Amino acid sequence: MLEYIAIAISLFFAMNIGASGAAASMGVAYGAGAITKAWQALLICAVGVFAGAVLGGGEVVKTISAGIMPQEYITVKIVIIILISATSSLFLANLLGIPLSTSEVTVGAVVGVGIAYKVLYVKSLLIIVAFWVLVPIIAFIVALLFGKLLYKLKNRGYLKNRPILTVLLVFAGFFEAFSAGMNNVANAVGPLVGAGMMTVTNGIWLGGAFVALGAMLLGKRVLETNGKKIVRFEKAEGILISTTGAVLVGISSVFGLPVPLTQVTSSSIIGMGMAKNGKQIFHKHIVKKIIRIWIVSPIFSLAISYGLVQLLMEKDLYAIVLMGSIIVGTLGAISLVRTVREEERAIYDAGEGI
């Protein structure tokens, strides 16, 4: 019975990954008008994410299933704890309006279990965390350098609205969905593989299918939202942003490293913005959002998974109180920051009205 519950949670998680993450990969192409119909963008996304999962998702699955803590500790009950921790972290974040990385919440949940049993592979974890910082920085630098070249070509009239740009933008969106499939399918099925409930091959096929299904059935709202937000980017800019994220996430996936596509894409946008507008881009809200995601994503799921292990497996009430305090303190700090920001905005608006 527990096996079926774990599989059900995993597949539900996979569908939500498809809706929130994979569908967003086509936002640039859809928003810029390269693809005019939402169902066409979602279909391309679904094909891309499924192909990426099946053809290149195996290495990240191995990392999630056995590269952070010993595989023998990942039982069916632990799988349920990991998946509940990751899913509930995303749910709490949605209530607070904070976008989280599915890779970071999944890794955080596994780490919480590893800490509870004191069997964590610290070296492997440090490598993963280092790449969480390094890959977005590389994305920023690449977008900044190529962005400057892009605007020079644009000013000289080389980048007019040519049909080839439309084709390249659609391909870049597909490539980004492909890389998302390579990296994100492991978040849903990695724990199942770790518990021996399915093989890596079966996991990537099943997980890829449900991530693609989630993109098709649940991704329209995300696509519409991202498309309207990203419509300010021209086609050439969109090609550079999507390609940068796709290449870096794809390379990370080949080496089995789960990396946050959200931060990579956001860093590319910052680099593009700095190439166009200079250093004032660092005063934008998007930089603050990236920092919040980096800090909050792993902490949420780590604290929840650790607390659930202590509650359900170890019966350690002291540890539960400690983890509960961390979660409450984190939520309180976020709420306080939001309140202060709203008060500052209200004061600013009042001043503007005088």
Image: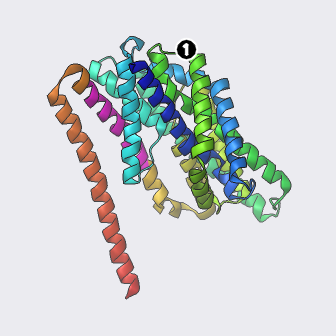
In the image, residue 105 lies in the stretch drawn in magenta = no
Q: Where is residue 174 in the image (x, y as percent from the top left)?
A: 70, 41
Quarter that holds the C terminus: bottom left
| Quarter of the rendering containing residue 323 | top left
Identify the residue at the far left of this view: 318
Q: Which residue is nearer to you in this view: 148 or 47? A: 47
Q: Which residue is nearer to you in this view: 115 or 158? A: 115
Q: Majority secondary structure of the magenta segment?
A: helix
Q: Give the range drawn in magenta.
A: 291-309
Left-right relation of 102 to 92: right
Compared to residue 343, the image places residue 241 above or below, namely above
Q: Position of residue 293 (x, y in %)?
A: 42, 46
Left-right relation of 152 to 321: right
Q: How crowded is mark 1: few (under 14 residues within 10 Å), some or many (20 or more)?
A: some
Identify the residue at the far top of this view: 72
Q: Residue at x 27, y 23 (%)?
A: 116
Q: Where is residue 94 in the image (x, y as percent from the top left)?
A: 41, 49
Is residue 72 in view from this perspective?
A: yes
Q: Position of residue 281 (x, y in %)?
A: 52, 61
Compared to residue 157, the image places residue 177 above or below, namely above
Left-right relation of 29 to 3: right
Q: Residue at x 35, y 27 (%)?
A: 81
Identify the residue at the far bottom of this view: 354
In the image, residue 294 lies in the stretch drawn in magenta = yes
Q: How is the protein colored in the picture?
A: rainbow
Amino acid type of the residue tagged 1 in the rendering: Thr
Query: Which residue is denoted by mark 1 in the rendering?
Result: 199
Q: Residue at x 42, y 30 (%)?
A: 107
Identify the residue at the far front of this view: 1
Q: How many marks?
A: 1
Is residue 121 in view from this perspective?
A: no
